Image (cartoon, rainbow, N blue to C red):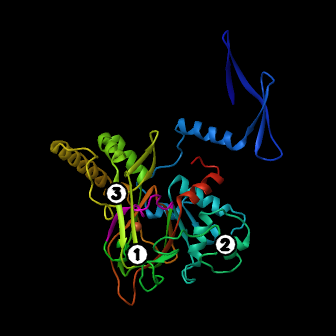
Amino acid sequence: MESEQSSAASRTRVTMKEYAIQSDNAHCEILWSDNVRTTHDLATLEHFYRRWNYQLNMDDRKRWTDLSEDDVRRSVDMSISFDALIMDQSGAGMTRGLAALYYYGILLITETPVDDDGAGIAAIGAALGGGNIKLPSNSILSTYQAGKKDLVLTTGTDGPMRTLYGSVWATSSGAQPQGTSVADSAYGSDGLPLHTDFTYQTDPPGLQIFTMVQPALEGGESVFGDGFAVAEALRSQNPDAFDILSKTIRTYHSKDELTGWNLRASGPIIKVDRGRIVSIRHNDLDRLPDLPPDGTKDSQEIDAFYDKLHDAHLAWNSLLAQDKYRLVMKLRPGDTMVVANQRCFHGRKSFSSSTSHPRIVMGCYVSQDELSSRFRMEGFNV
Ligand SMILES: [Fe+2]
């Protein structure tokens, strides 16, 4: 660390000679080369440091393409067993899991229990979000490790995010808690194009957690994609399309009269902050018709707006259709895929099943703020 002091006559570079963290663990005393001592709040110093790193564009996340199911299953960076993630009380498993989600935006968890009414899934949500505290009465994770099977704790500070689909959801209507919404297209058997979830929520969840309970009789493979990789490809191949999709605000909605939800939110497909791609919001099935910018009255301008937006969107979707951006996984019972929902896409191929053998997927969400908090606790610059 160094600073500069200027005067009318000269400009002298002052460097840090030594520093000491004070006993309150919240402040730092610095001795400078001109023997001046200063005291600083650690949170402020960390804030400056993160901002400085950000400006140097030190984005060390790994964009992925051409990834196969075998690659993921064999990777110690992208896959972990349920017990290694949840039952290792040293926290090493959680550190591994969070590193996968920071660097790649996906994590495969094998051998998830599928016969405990979602308790194991809630424990995964707790392991990757919330405060990660060790107080058993407040922690879903601690209570799970102690053998209890709670999905939600009334005084808890970790665990699944509550949404219109409940805390732990299931795509089989028989397994879905009564009163929760089944309005989403996930409850059918058609293929689903790559998308992110909750585009109709102001701050979409940070993690989407899927556990395969019972695969379809035929088809139903899960598909994933790295939105940051696709967005970077668009930026280099078609800068105009990138510019349009990162600046045009689209609106998304979800309305379910039966359960009384009417959600709507807006944002660009590609969100950029000081040149860096920071989040993706994309679901063509939930998107409302685009409107020209306020005040545009000239019909030629309006036509040009729609033409350019249409072409940009086509370029985006044609990238999403390329095999190199599509990771296809045939999930087995007990496989859980965790997806960083503001970065990576998910979708599925169409499937056939029977009433006696439905395709059953269960899961839950973790909020982006909770995920970002855990990333920061692990030392990642978010
Ligand atoms: Fe989805």
**Label tally:** 3
Under circle 1, the secondary element is loop
Q: Which residue is mark 3?
A: 251
Q: From this view, report whether residue 87 is shown above or below residue 32.
A: below
Could you tell me residue 55's position as x and y percent? 53, 36
Left or right side of 76 for 26: right
Question: Farthest bottom residue?
Answer: 356
The quarter of the image that holds ligand 1 is bottom left
Instruction: Please tell me which residue is depicted at 46% across the width and 56% down the height of the picture.
Output: 342
Could you tell me residue 168's position as x and y percent? 52, 75
Q: Which residues are magenta?
A: 191-206
- Between marks 1 and 3, how big is the CA–CA gap? 20 Å
Q: Residues within 10 Å of mark 1 (few under 14, many from 20)?
A: few
- Displayed quadrant of residue 114: bottom right
Q: Is tag 2's residue or tag 3's residue first in the polypeptide sequence?
A: 2
Q: Which residue is mark 1?
A: 260
Mark 2–mark 3 contact, CB under 8 Å? no
Left or right side of 373 for 190: left
Q: Is tag 2's residue or tag 1's residue first in the polypeptide sequence?
A: 2
Residue 349 in view (yes/no): yes
Inspect the magenta stretch and tell me whether residue 253 lies in it: no
Between 32 and 294, the one nearer to me in the picture:
294
Q: Nearer the viewer, mark 1 or mark 3?
A: 1
- Between marks 2 and 3, how big is the CA–CA gap? 35 Å
* Magenta region, main secondary structure: loop
Between 68 and 227, the one nearer to me in the picture:
227
- Between marks 2 and 1, how big is the CA–CA gap? 26 Å
